[in-house]
Every structure is written in structure tokens, then in C-alpha cells.
Image: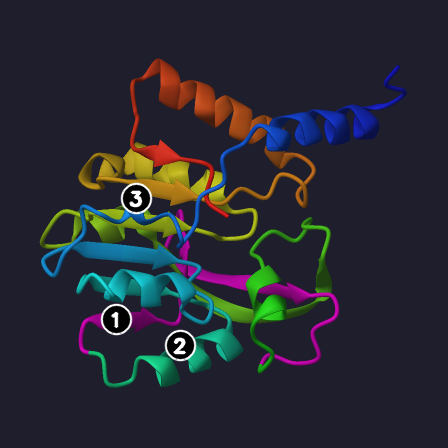
Amino acid sequence: MVKNYSEFRTKLLQKINKNRKKLGVHDEYIFKHLNSESLCIDLGANVGKVTTKLRTYGSEVICFEPHPGASKQLKNKFQTDTKVRILDAAASDRNGTAKLFLHKDSIDTNDYGAFSESSSLVSTKVNVSTNSYVNITEIDIGEFVNTLPKRVNFMKIDVEGYEVGLLWRLISSGAIHKIDNIYVETHEEKVPWLFWKLLFLKTYLNVNGIKNVNFNWT
């Protein structure tokens, strides 16, 4: 018998994740439609693992990476690549500034890799510190996609708990219909309330026949 909400949530997530087909850079079939004319957006690019994969197809890539340490590494890696555009900003549901909360074990903002990968706009994420943060620029992702001169062929969203807000903004702005495929990594195991918000969002997408969002990225 499940004794409390926390235990119920844990067991439910374990059951869901057990049957989940996880996708990533090694799943070639999800990239097969890309070519040198394609436009891709990497939200939460970190140090460029996914961007590197996308560039093997010759595609143009726009990276969003607000963490100073990760962004520096990203720029060093692609400094001579004219088809990679790097924005020192977080994709958001608004334009402005925000706090990027750092991993609780992060020493400074030059950390990158596992620590930068865990930083988040969500203060309630279990592995960040509310006392350790940097002020960053946030860009309205719906507005951004709508102003692009051509269709987006591939978007990856890995934003450490902020994925629901981004997707709602893509929906409300109509920009979701200008993107071929969206692959989302979800973080409901690290943000307690996120499970239910994701469930509602997935139901909305299903009811409204929006089929270009895949939640199995990892």
C-alpha cells in the first residue's frame, strides 16, 4: 500500500520510466530528415553535444545557453563555425532578466558539464541552490521562432524543469506550428509539481492533435 503522496509519485514515475523509450543523439532515425538547408534550435545547449550531432548533417544551429561556463565552452568549440549561432540567454516565455540557479555543489560560474547542465530557472529544483545564482537574459521563445525567416526543422528542449512553460509559450504564440519536430527532456523527478503540469500539457496536446512534440529525449 502507498502510504503518502511522495511514495505514490515515486512509484508512478518508476513505472512510467520503465516502459519509456528514451531517445538521444545515437538514434539516427530522428535526424534522417536533416540536411544542409535545415534550421535547428538547441535549447539548453550546455557544451554542445547535440549541436555537434546536428552539424554532422550540415544543418544551421541556433544555441541557447545561459550558464556562463557552458556558454564559454560552447563558443570556444564552435568559434570558427559560421553555421552555429550562440545566444548567452535562456529560452523563456517572456523577454527580460531572470535568476539562473546553480547546482548546489557548483563552486563558481566557470563550472561546466554536469554542474552547468543542472542549473535551472526553477528555484524548487531539488539539486540547485537558491543562494547561488547568476542574473541572465531570457528570450521569449515564441516570439523568437515567429521572427525567424524560415521553418524550424528540429528543436531540442533540455531546460531543467522549465520545459512546460516553454511549450505553453510555443502553443500560445502559434510558433509550435512552425516547428517540424520537438524533442523534450523532462525533469519531473527533480521538480515535485512538474509531473502534474506535464500530464495536463500532454493531455492538451493530444486533445488538440498537436503531434510534433516527443517527451522521450534524454
Q: Residues within 10 Å of mark 1 (few under 14, many from 20)?
A: some
Q: Circle 1 is placed at which residue position?
A: 85
Q: Residue 156, percent across and down?
A: 37, 50
181 displayed left or right of 191 = left
The image's mark for residue 74 is: 2
Q: Circle 3 is placed at which residue position?
A: 30
SS class, disc 2: helix
The N terminus sits in image quarter: top right
User: Which mark is nearer the camera, 1 or 3?
Assistant: 3
Contact, CB < 8 Å: mark 1 with mark 3? no
Residue 90 vertical position relative to residue 184 in the rendered view, above or below: below
Q: Residue 139, percent across and down?
A: 35, 58
Residue 42 vertical position relative to residue 210 in the rendered view, above or below: below
Q: Residue at x 55, y 52 (%)?
A: 160
Choose the circle earlier in sequence order: 1 or 3. Answer: 3
Disc 3 marks a residue whose amino acid type is: Ile
Task: Give the magenta-colored segment's residue range.
Answer: 82-109
SS class, disc 3: helix
